[in-house]
Amino acid sequence: MMANEEKIIIIDDEQVILDAVSKIASLERWNVDVALNAKEGLNKLSSNQYSLILSDIMMPEMDGFKLLEELYNRHIDIPVIMITGYSTVENAVKSLHKGAIDFIPKPFTFEEIASSINRGLNYRNIKVKFEEAEKCSTNDSVIYVPCPPKYKRMGYMSWVNLEYEGAAVVGVTDLFLETIEDTLMVELMEVDELLIQGSSCAKFETNDGLIHTCLAPLGGRIVERNERIFTNPSLLEKDPFFEGWLYRIIPSDIEYDMKYLNACSSDRV
Amino acid sequence: MKSQIFIKDMFTKIGLKLIVAVGLVTALIIGVYSFLNIRSQTKVLLTQAEVHANKLSDAIKNSTYSSMLLNKRDQIHEIINTIGQEPCIREIRLLNKEGMVMFSSENELIGDMVDKKAESCYACHTADEPLEKLPMKERMRIYRIHPDSARILGIINPIYNEKSCWDSDCHAHPRDQTVLGVLDVKMCLKDVDEQISDSEFSSIIFALIAIVSLSLIIGFFVRRWVGKPVNELVTATHEVSTGNLNYTIKELGNDELGILAKSFNNMTKNLAEARLQLFQSDKMASLGRLAAGVAHEINNPLTGVLTYSSFLLKRVKNNKELEEDLKVIVRETKRSREIVKSLLDFARQSVPKKHSANINEIINNAIEVVNNQLSLKHINLEEHLDSSLPKATLDANQIQQVFINLLVNAADAIGDSGGNISIDTKLISLSPHGIAQIKSAVCPKRHDLIDNEVKINGMPTIKVKVISNGNEGYINFDPIYGKHRHNYGIEIKQGKDVQVSCPKCIISLIAKDSSCPKCNSKVYEFEVPPQGMFWGCTNPECDWEKWEAVDEAGHKDFVEIKISDTGNGITKEDISRIFEPFYTTKGQKGTGLGLAVIWGIIDNHNGTINVESELGKGTTFIIHLPIKAKS
């Protein structure tokens, strides 16, 4: 189903990880290149074309965050998925804030890594299409709907809109929904449960049997969830930023969490 | 052993010095007193002896008066001889005007001529013209015949011419003579001298007894009031220096040394707490690093297991048996993943995710979890929860874990015999003293006083210039309100004139028209924008400080949670270590992590946890959690 020219590079200092991901990729018929450290990875990136980068965070010499900075400095616009054995929510939030599109804690299952790679490749394709459309300035076809300017987003996945009276509304972005293609089922958390920034807040099951996890953009107690999504799942895709909201929460430490969110207004320049 | 000898030496030195000093002063005072006393006594005794001699001399003169008139020489002889028999009278003689001994108690001397230069004649015959009248003092003389003999008091009594002398029938003295002769009486002063030496002896004995007894009394009190407390303090210092911060000095009264002992105890208590906190932070940090390392190292091989097994699972869809087995591997690997994850959480590598929560509710949730266990052990749970508690900003999951752990610990301490656990919550307000930090400080000319070079406890200090007693230097003030751990670059003597000024523009920072309410010394002031003025006492001995803005913002509100049990209590040695990771009294049953994790959680919430325990009576854990989280 994926085109063969899609090439993925995996950077990790553990051979077993490289082997495992290569194995999964071969089953999904993706082309995989591996690098045992960030420097080697950067060398390969400068000589070959890749669609997706998977990188460990804790590596000797140059760690995953430094790699993200280096990619930004070199204007390498390839989506990055972070994988780490040091799987704290802080690392997840930091990864997304620094430009990674996803965060997978080790150890992961076949499905977890496959769904993430799938989304990553889709993300890449959408971005490429979007850039082409920009170049041709054929504005008649909308690739994806960007989030409204007054919203804030966590990576490309989820958004927050601060309401009056200290409440906040949380949802998923159109881009995220585009990357997972057709949603079959949505799994949400219960009212009164706690959202933790950087940990899973909703699961989307798709036709291909993959389960996609969306990370919460803000921590807080859930006071209301959008029950209409269960009766009318198309709401999500039709209007992800308004009618298709997920939760209304009372944020717990808004000042702390806000530091890791990006303003959507900056996307439109 | 060595130290004890050292301590004894030291005591003897102080004690001995004081005793010697007091002894010397006593000796001086009593010596002078005795000297004056002996002198005045000697004087009185001699005067008495002189008066006595004079009277005797007059008596002899009077008794021989009539015999002389009648010229009855035998009678005069007899009278003189009789009186001369008295044991204390050495000699009585009558001399005529020419100096011839006319009568004497020593018969062989009669007829001798006495030279005018002899000691008895000297008083009158020094001048060219002999004196006719002499006062009593002049008529006396005290001398020794030879150095070893007793002293002798001689008194001369001139016999004047009078009418009856030239009228007499027998032998008329010429009328123009004034002095007819001299009566010379010599008395020995043996008795007087004995009395004098007696009183000298008793004075010296008195002085010696006084000096010795005063020294002993002083020595006793010095030992009791100075020696013993100093000894106790030295022992305590030694204990502390060898690392025993649990050593406390027993009550030493209310004098300066008692106060010193109290502040010493206070100091060691604070030191012990600080050390424990430091130790905890250190242990928690290394535990965190350990957990992070373990998580990282274990997660990599686990990834291999999980991916390969889930990969295999994909490929064996038709082999039911293999699929079941692989599912077990996947399931168990996922379980391992959860364990590693909880280890990471346990080590508190992640900051708490705080939100507004009701502590009473969290306690009730925790009680629900352990209720079964408590009723099995016949433990009665009493709740005194303050329903008016405001919500606090905290991580409800973590705090619930704290309560569950403490309740389980309490139940374990009580055992199977049954007992009571009580939980109390209330709102308290704690002083900003020792908490609030000065983060900015300026002089009246808006120069920054904050010094980033010299830090106290890792925090930038407030640097001021000081001139005291002719010396110039700098002081770095402790930025924590009320902690008073100032860094003195110059010695300031109490009561000496102190000038505090800005190091940049030399403008005075001494507050005009105000003085320290505690010790009346000068007060320095500077502005802490935007939190108003800060005042402090210039006396290094005094800890007065005032920061109105912070005082007014007042006491910070805390929720106090007390969890008490009637269990077997904790020993003193254990109490100091219970918050250490891997320290357990439960043997194989415990991991030694529970209380360490609790400590970490409370610390992450900027709260404090303390234990009070009495063996056999029970234990109380006291937790203070701030209502508002620090931004």
Image: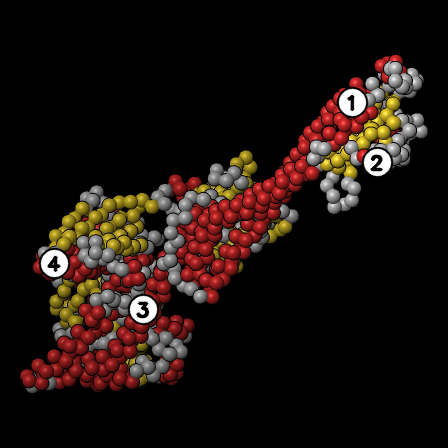
Chain of the residue under the numbered disc 2 shown in the image: B
Mark 2 packing: few (<14 Cα in 10 Å), some, or many (20+)?
A: some
Identify which amino acid the numbered label 1 is placed on.
Answer: Thr
Q: Position of residue B352 (x, y in %)?
A: 28, 60
The residue singled out by tag 3 in the image is B288
Dots 3 and 4: beta carbons under 8 Å? no
Return the residue at label 1: B64
Disc 2 element: helix
Looking at the rendered structure, whether the residues under marks 1 and 2 are on a common chain is answered as yes
In the image, is residue A156 above or below residue A5?
A: above
Residue B327's disc number: none
Q: Are marks 1 and 3 in contact (CB under 8 Å)?
A: no
Q: Amino acid at mark 2?
A: Leu
User: Residue B156's spot in the image, x, y percent?
Assistant: 80, 29
**Which chain letter matches label 3?**
B
Answer yes or no: is residue B271 visible: yes
Q: Which residue is mark 2?
A: B109
Q: Are marks 1 and 2 in contact (CB under 8 Å)?
A: no
How far is mark 3 from mark 4, CA to CA?
38 Å
Q: CA distance from mark 4 to mark 2?
A: 122 Å
| Foreground residue among B412 and B597 | B412
Task: Give the answer, above or below, for where B94 lies relative to B396.
Answer: above
**Circle 4: is it few (<14), some (14-19), or many (20+) Cα within 10 Å?**
few
